[in-house]
Each structure stands twice: as structure tokens, then as C-alpha cells.
Amino acid sequence: MMKTMTVPSALSEKERLVLDLIVEHYLEGGKPVSSGRVAQKKRQVGSPATVRAIMASLEERGYLVQPHTSAGRVPTDLGLRAYVNHLFTASLSRQAGAPASVEELDTGRADFGALLVQASKILAEESDNLGFVISPHISRIRFHHLRFIKVSAEKVMVILVTPFHMVLTEIVESLAPFTQLELDRSSQYLNQNFQGKTLIAVRDILLQELPKYRAKYEALINKLLTLVRASVRDEEGESRIILQGTSRLLSKAELFDMEKLKTLFESFEEKANLTRLLSDFISLDRVKVLIGSELNAPNIADCSLILSHYGTSTQVLGSLGIIGPKRIPYEKIIPLVDSVAQRLSRAIARVGNEVPL
């Protein structure tokens, strides 16, 4: 289960300033930060002796750790969490400064898949880390119009037009043979009776309704159920993940335990497992940040995950975000993920307004 660390107690203004300075120096250089460095940077926090006392207090409360006796301090996951919490409001309030590539996220195409690929590419390139987008399974999207096309004796193409006027397709295998006439009638029945619902909802309703039609329409309803079930058969594990920038993490090997990095990339190869892992973290928060141990997954304990969701005004369609080292520039990454999520949602809405059915 996902857990976000709770900061144990309020920090004074000076403690907050010292912690923020240590985190910022650490994120930039990756080395322990000394009291002299902090005092030199911000004289208002006091002398090096005063700073040392504050750092000792922060260490005692779990925000900092001293790697070696003679070294300065580095932030713990709790220290990073306190820094991110303090940073959050300011980061999300920045409307200016979104990269040009985000503003250019293509709104002129009705190809849902291409938009998601473009979004994941922007996330990877602008963050110099791993960008991902999770798209929903076709069975989880409400349909405005649905059509079935016979591809072969055992395969049927599902063409789903969303309420936001994008077209999604999927090939499913059906155990029951269909003629194209039967498929056309099935499409017509579903469009007339279930417009605005998901295929999962349709399946559940048909299962409930079957006893009412057992005498006269059992064969027809059973056959239609076979087709709908084929469309939603793997609904639990079939969300798709689009990854961009895996090579960017390889170039940061010094920020990871190499064995954990190897396991991480093995997870990337097992995309279904990675999708399930990331789906556990989906949240309706505008942006969610999970740091190290909060991920509750040993193979990504050296990572941070920054994610958001995208969709329409009536339905969350999926999530997107960035996976990178804990030493990631949160001040830049948080608004980046937020702006891509909002821009992608606007692109989907705009296509819906511009593309006629």
C-alpha cells in the first residue's frame, strides 16, 4: 500500500531555511552540505555554530543524516518530503515558464495514441529522465458510438468513438463466430441502449438483464455477452504504458545502486508489471510526488515518482509522469508534470470540439 510520509512536527523559520538550503545544495551537487556552506549562503540564519545546532536538531528528528563523522549532512527521504511539501504551492502557482514543447502539444489531431506518445516524449526530454503515460484500456472509456467489424473467423475489431470525439480501435478474439450482420445489429443495439457507458458497465448490465430475456433472446444475449466479454477480458491488466527516455536513466548510473537499477530496467521490460505498479499510485491530486521509501518497492527505492492525471471534465482517462533519481530538480519537475497533464487534457477537449462525428 502506498504511504506518504508525514512530517512529524512544524519547523521554525530558521529550521525551514536551513533544511531548504541543504536540500537544494544536495540536489545540485550530491555531496554532504556543511554548516559553513549554509551560513555563507544565508547569513540571516546565524553563525556556523548556530547552523550546526539547527542541523543537529534536524538530524535528531529524522530530516538529515550525517554519512561520516567529519562530513556535512544530506537529507533523508523525510527531509526531501518536507522540502517538497514546502515547495508544492509555489511550484504549482507558476503559470509562466512552461517549456515551449508543452505549449505546442499537438491539438490538431484526433489520434489519441499519438497525443500520448507526444506527451511522454515531452516529459522525458524536458526532465532528462524517464517519462511515462498510462493510457486506459478501451473497455474503461465511455463511448459515444461503437462499431464491430469482422476481421477473421475469430477476430473482431472494436471501433470506439469517445464523447470527446477521438477514435480508438482494438482487435479482440471472440470464441463465438459472428457474421457481419450480427455484428452490425450488436453495434446498433449497444449504441441505442448504452451510449455514454463503458464496455465494463455494459457487460455487468447484460449479465443482470439476461434472466429477463431467457425465454426468447437467450441465444442472442449470450452471443452479445461473448463479444463484450472479449472486449473487456483483460481489463485488470491491460492499461498500456508508453515509456520514453530509459537511456536517460542509464546515463545517471552514479545516482542509483547498480543492482537496483538493473532490477528497475527489468521492470521496464515487464511493462504489464510496471503498469500495475504505477497504477497503484494513481491519485486525483493535481500532482503527486512519491520519494524513495514511499514507493514501497525495493527496486525503485532510489527513485522519485512525480505523477498527475489527464482526461475530460467527466472522466479521468489515465496518468502520466516522470521517474527519476531522488536527486531530481523538484522545483522544475513538479510544474512540468502539471503543465503536461493540463495541456494534454485541453488538447483532448479541443479535438472534441473541432472534430465532427
Image: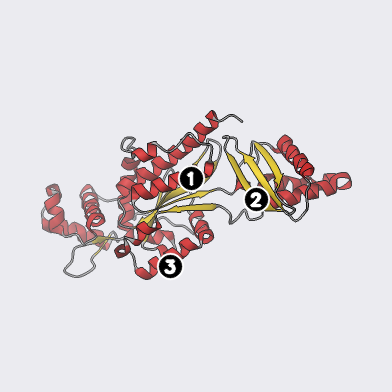
- Any mark on residue 185, and which? none
Q: Which residue is mark 2?
A: 171
Name the residue type under label 1: Leu
Helix or strand or loop: what does disc 3 sit on?
Answer: helix
Quick one: 47 or 347, which is closer to the camera? Answer: 347
Query: Could you tell me residue 28's position as x and y percent?
Result: 24, 54
Q: Which residue is mark 3?
A: 263
Query: Could you tell me residue 122's position as x and y percent?
Result: 39, 45
Quadrant housing residue 292: bottom left
**Marks 3 and 2 in Cβ contact (< 8 Å):** no
Give the CA distance from mark 1 to mark 2.
20 Å
Q: Which residue is mark 1?
A: 116
Give the CA distance from mark 3 to mark 2.
32 Å
Give the CA distance from mark 1 to mark 3.
26 Å
On the rendered image, what quadrant is the C terminus found in? top right
Name the residue type under label 2: Ile
- Taking the image as drawn, is residue 308 in sight? no
For the point 10% across and 54% down, which residue is it? 47
